[in-house]
């Protein structure tokens, strides 16, 4: 399949690497010349004499590995090159805020968004590694009239990249769930790290702190945009979290060991159920 990946950062570069290894004809578009040269040198993308316009008009699949607002800008700028035989997708962590506009701008091509639930605390193509997708969740967010063939194409891409569970989910439901499982966890990690006012903390860190704060190392430009694009869902999850934290806080203030025990038993029960489902 002829694939054009727009944006060769960590995720785009990892897609390019993995899909090239599976025999796809992969080309890249990126604003940074050094990034493109790196990708070519590594064999992630093919060298081509075609212009960007020619690549876009002849691609079977276009993968947008760029920020949410940049997606709409790119589609609007290049909409004259899209054809009815193409599928355009993105790897963005939010959907509802732009998916309808993206669908219109992509016509006559089919726009079908997806979300690879994988990554690193590093940015840039130098850290590209297709093994990060192995066993990870792959979410496809079709609209009501999305052709089944487009869904099958993304399913194939997921399998070629060795993703694990492949799930179909509506854009709205996607944003609700990701607001909790991804964005809230990042918000908690950032807040935990920023709440540290003790200069000696570094000498007392154990596995608990490391595990909780790993994702506090964050791409500020990307995540600021993701948070704002999905702020209603995220704010609702933050409020629910605050409610639970206040219950624990009250139990401490009241010296209520029984209440603390119940909170700990309940969280342990839920976490064990989660592990069983994962296996």
Image (spheres, rainbow, N blue to C red):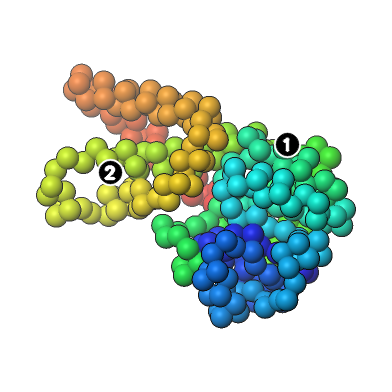
* Percent x, y of residue 204: 16, 52
Name the side, left or right, on which 264 lies relative to 174.
Answer: left
Residue displayed at 17% across by 53% down: 202
Circle 1 residues within 10 Å: few <14, some 14–19, many ≥20? few
Circle 2 residues within 10 Å: few <14, some 14–19, many ≥20? some
Q: Nearer the viewer, residue 60 or 170?
A: 60
CA gap between label 2 and label 1 equals 37 Å
Name the side, left or right, on which 44 lies relative to 143.
Answer: left
Is tag 2's residue or tag 1's residue first in the polypeptide sequence?
Answer: 1
* Percent x, y of residue 149: 84, 54
Q: Is residue 79 visible?
A: yes
* Percent x, y of residue 239: 42, 24
Residue 201 is labelled as none
In the structure shown, which secondary structural element does the residue marked by tag 1 occupy?
helix
Q: Which residue is mark 2?
A: 193
In the structure shown, which secondary structural element does the residue marked by tag 2 occupy?
helix
Q: Nearer the viewer, residue 254 or 7?
A: 7
151 w.r.t. 235: above or below: below
Residue displayed at 32% across by 23% down: 247
Mark 2 against mark 1, which lies toward the viewer? Answer: 1
* Quadrant where the image shows the C terminus: bottom right
Q: Nearer the viewer, residue 23 or 208?
A: 23
Q: Which residue is mark 1?
A: 100
Name the side, left or right, on which 199 lies relative to 187.
Answer: left
Name the side, left or right, on which 85 lies relative to 42.
Answer: right
């Amino acid at each position: 399949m002829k694939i054009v990946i727009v944006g060769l950062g960590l995720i785009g570069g990892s897609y390019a690497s993995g899909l090239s290894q599976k025999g796809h004809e992969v080309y890249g578009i990126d604003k940074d010349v050094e990034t493109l040269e790196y990708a070519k040198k590594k064999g992630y993308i093919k060298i081509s004499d075609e212009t960007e316009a020619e690549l876009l008009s002849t691609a079977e699949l276009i993968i947008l590995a760029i920020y949410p607002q940049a997606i709409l800008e790119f589609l609007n700028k290049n909409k004259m090159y899209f054809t009815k035989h193409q599928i355009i997708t993105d790897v963005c962590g939010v959907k509802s805020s732009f998916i309808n506009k993206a669908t219109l701008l992509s016509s006559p091509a089919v726009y079908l968004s997806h979300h690879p639930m994988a990554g690193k605390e590093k940015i840039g193509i130098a850290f590209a590694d297709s093994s990060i997708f192995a066993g990870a969740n792959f979410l496809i967010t079709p609209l009501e009239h999305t052709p089944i063939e487009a869904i099958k194409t993304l399913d194939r891409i997921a399998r070629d990249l060795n993703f694990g569970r492949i799930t179909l989910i509506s854009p709205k439901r996607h944003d609700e769930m990701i607001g909790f499982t991804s964005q809230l966890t990042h918000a908690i990690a950032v807040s935990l790290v920023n709440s540290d006012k003790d200069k000696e903390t570094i000498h007392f860190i154990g596995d608990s702190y490391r595990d909780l704060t790993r994702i506090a190392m964050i791409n500020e430009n990307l995540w600021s945009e993701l948070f704002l694009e999905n702020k209603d869902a995220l704010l609702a999850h933050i409020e629910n979290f605050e409610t639970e934290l206040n219950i624990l806080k009250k139990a401490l203030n009241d010296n209520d060991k029984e209440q603390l025990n119940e909170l700990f038993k309940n969280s342990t029960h839920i976490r064990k159920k989660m592990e069983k489902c994962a296996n």
